[in-house]
Amino acid sequence: MKAHAVFVSYLIPVLASLAFPRDRAPGPMKRAFLRDNGLSLIFGALFLVSLAGQAWSGLVDFNNDQLARGAPPVSLGRYLLSSSFAVDAAENWQSEYLQFFSTSSPPSGSESKPAGRIGR
């Protein structure tokens, strides 16, 4: 059995137990799940849409480079498995995380207020 198959066979029951806890009374479970997890589902969907957009635009750019060099274009599946897509996605995520952490830290040094002006 391959490593990803073992991981998926472990991951599915864990996700199912998180999505449908057993301590809830039977009934409108679907509505409760959507209400309890709506924000996560929306952000997850936005993430997948943005990743799909990045994959599509990366494929177009990659195939344009391939054609410029005289090489044949590749399919979407082949591009998704390529190191080019992995590098592009990792660089994008790295820049987003760096931007987030550089703007979310509290001000320090000359950026902070003097002790007498705190709270004003």
Image (cartoon, grey):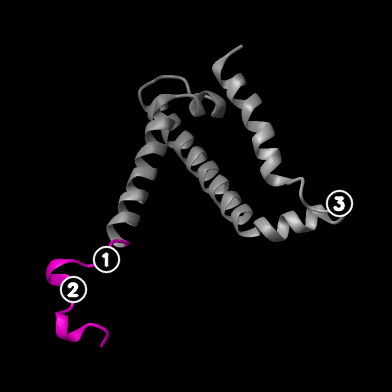
The stretch drawn in magenta includes residue 36: no
- Residue 76 x %, y %: 55, 29
Pick the quarter of the image with the N terminus.
top right
For disc 3, the marked residue is 26
- Residues shaded magenta: 104-120
What's the residue at 70%, 46% (across, down)? 19
> Which residue is most to the top?
1
For disc 2, the marked residue is 112
For disc 1, the marked residue is 106
Image check: 117 left or right of 77? left
- Residue 42 x %, y %: 61, 56
What's the residue at 17%, 71% (across, down)? 111
Give above or below for 46 relative to 119: above
Q: Secondary structure at mark 2?
A: loop
The three-letter amino acid code for the residue at tag 3 is Pro
- Of the image marks 3 and 2, the number of the one nearer the N terminus: 3
Q: Which of label 3 and label 1 is nearer to you? A: 3
What's the residue at 40%, 29% (across, down)? 84
The three-letter amino acid code for the residue at tag 2 is Ser
